[in-house]
Structure formats: structure tokens, C-alpha cells
């Protein structure tokens, strides 16, 4: 089990993080999607811990990072992540961001380039007017679904019909402890993300991954990111959806590990 780490952010907000794997190994910062705690990584985290010391965090409004709700942004979540690295005594880390975590990872790589050894962006988007939005039909289905029905709608967006586990078993479908105010703040942070002008400044080696059949965040966003970030690689996984990194972990995780292995820690 990861060890819990607490630190106080620049504004006094108490942040919770989790440190796993072997101490002294290269650090890997794992960043989850919106309205989710570090539990997002439960299904795949252990596969990284033979090679890395893993660092996760509870975004403000999730898990054990609770306090006043404010106008949070992907930029402010990035600053929180860097403060957690500082608290853990980590100067540089490999960074793997998924969904909104990919947006946060873009901000870390753009604003704190000396902290990022290499970058993987999965099922995410550059945001702003250049991004490719999900269809109106999907947005409307999510908006009108009750809390109970939303879980099933999300499950269908994250996983293919071949995935054998029910929605209740997934750690990707939201932190049920969040208040409506916290949920709204997360959705606003994700919706207002726009890194388009920053992407060409990213200097970390970057790999962009996406599920071809992702209706939550269309795969064309991966192509935009790969074109916009200098030297970025791109890998699209056929027949997979928003949670492809978990459902197809046997293919995706080795690809991430191989990419990081090609960027030595020293």
C-alpha cells in the first residue's frame, strides 16, 4: 500500500499525496481524471512500482484533499502537484497524465519544464477552441442522466462491452464523496483548460496515447497534441474507449514503461 504524505499548499490548503514503490527509484507522477482521487490508479499502479517510486495526489475537492472550494484550474492543480513533489524531496519526475490529468500534465511540462523528465499524455485534449469536443449527443446524455444512471453512462464511455466488470467495481467513474460544489469546480477547471499556445514550448520527450473509439474525448485531440508538441510520438489503440489505459493495460502499460526507459533518469 502507498504511504500517505500530507503537505500544505502555498495558500494553506492541505493536500494529500501517496507514495509507493521502491524508495530511491526514479519518480513517476501519476495524474488522474477530473472529479477523481488517487484511487483512479488502483488497477494499474502496481505495474509501475518495480521500476518507479510512484507519486499520486488527491486533487483539491477529492479524497483527503478537502477544504474551501475556489475557482480551481488545471494550472493551479499543476502548481499543487509541484508542491507535492517538493514536499517529497523530488526534483524531477516522469509524468503520466490521463484525461484531465493529461491537461494538468501539460501545464506542469509547460510551466515547470525542469521538473519533467518525460511525459505521457493519454485520453486528453489541448483544450480551448482548437480542441475537438465530444458530440452534442454525448454531452446531452451526460447532462440529463441521474446520479445513478450517470455511472452506467460513464461506464459505457470508458469501457468496451468486452470489459467484464460492472460499474460499481470501477475506480475511474468519479469520487462519490465529492459535493456538488466540488464537482462543479472540477468540471469548470477541465472545461476552461487551454494549453494550445503553450504546447510548442514543451521540451520534455512526449508520447501521446488514445483510444480510437473514445467518445468522451475524441481521438482527433491526440493527433492535435502530437502535432503541436515538438517531437511528440503518437499511438492510437483501435477498438478502445476512454478507459483504454486500464482495460488494455497489458498493451498500454508496457508501451509507457518502454517510452520512459528510453529517457534515462540520469
Image (cartoon, rainbow, N blue to C red):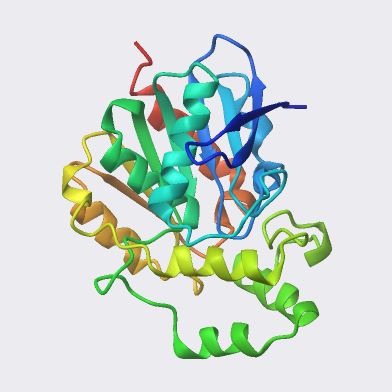
Q: Say which of 185 and 92 sits in front.
A: 185
In the image, is 141 to the left or to the right of 133? right
The x and y percentages for residue 61 are: 64, 55
Residue in front for this viewpoint, 249 or 158: 158
Percent position (x, y) of residue 180?
A: 68, 72
Q: Quadrant of residue 167?
A: bottom right
Quarter placement of the C terminus: top left
Q: Which residue: 43% across, 49% down?
A: 76
Which of the 4 quarters of the picture holds residue 33?
bottom right
Q: Could you tell whether 233 is left or right of 135 in the image?
A: left
Work out which quarter of the rendered image holds the N terminus and state it. top right
Q: Which residue appears farthest toward the front when viewing the image?
A: 12
Residue plotted at (59% across, 50% down): 60
Rendered location of residue 63, percent (x, y) = 71, 48
Answer whether residue 241 is visible to the viewer in this image. no
Q: How many marks?
A: 0
Residue 163 visible, this orientation: yes
Residue 109 pos. (x, y %): 31, 39
- Look at the picture and state if 33 lies above or below 26: below
At a point 61% along the width and 82% down the height, the residue shown is 142
Decide which of 33, 161 is in the foreground and name it. 33
Compared to residue 1, the image places residue 121 above or below, namely: below
Residue ID at (22%, 41%): 202
- The image quarter containing residue 134 is bottom left
Amino acid at each position: 500500500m502507498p504511504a500517505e504524505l500530507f503537505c500544505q499548499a502555498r495558500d494553506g490548503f492541505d493536500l494529500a499525496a501517496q507514495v509507493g514503490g521502491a524508495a530511491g527509484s526514479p519518480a513517476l507522477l501519476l495524474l488522474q481524471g477530473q472529479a477523481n482521487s488517487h484511487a483512479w490508479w488502483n488497477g494499474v499502479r502496481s505495474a509501475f512500482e518495480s521500476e518507479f517510486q510512484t507519486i499520486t495526489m488527491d486533487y483539491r475537492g477529492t479524497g483527503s484533499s478537502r477544504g474551501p472550494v475556489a475557482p480551481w484550474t488545471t494550472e493551479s492543480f499543476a502548481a499543487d502537484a509541484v508542491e507535492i513533489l517538493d514536499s517529497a524531496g523530488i526534483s524531477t519526475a516522469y509524468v503520466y497524465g490521463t484525461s484531465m490529468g493529461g491537461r494538468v500534465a501539460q501545464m506542469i511540462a509547460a510551466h515547470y519544464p525542469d521538473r519533467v523528465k518525460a511525459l505521457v499524455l493519454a485520453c486528453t485534449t489541448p483544450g480551448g477552441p482548437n480542441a475537438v469536443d465530444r458530440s452534442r449527443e454525448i454531452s446531452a446524455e451526460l447532462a440529463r442522466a441521474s446520479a445513478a444512471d450517470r455511472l452506467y453512462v460513464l461506464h459505457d464511455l470508458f469501457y468496451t462491452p468486452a470489459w467484464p466488470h460492472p460499474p460499481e467495481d470501477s475506480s475511474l467513474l468519479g469520487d462519490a464523496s465529492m459535493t456538488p460544489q466540488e464537482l462543479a469546480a472540477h468540471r469548470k477547471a477541465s472545461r476552461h483548460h487551454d494549453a494550445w499556445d503553450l504546447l510548442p514550448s514543451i521540451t520534455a520527450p512526449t508520447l501521446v496515447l488514445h483510444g480510437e473509439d473514445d467518445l468522451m474525448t475524441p481521438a482527433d485531440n491526440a493527433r492535435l497534441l502530437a502535432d503541436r508538441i515538438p517531437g511528440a510520438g503518437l499511438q492510437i489503440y483501435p477498438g478502445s474507449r476512454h478507459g483504454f489505459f486500464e482495460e488494455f493495460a497489458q498493451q498500454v502499460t508496457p508501451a509507457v514503461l518502454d517510452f520512459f526507459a528510453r529517457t534515462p533518469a540520469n
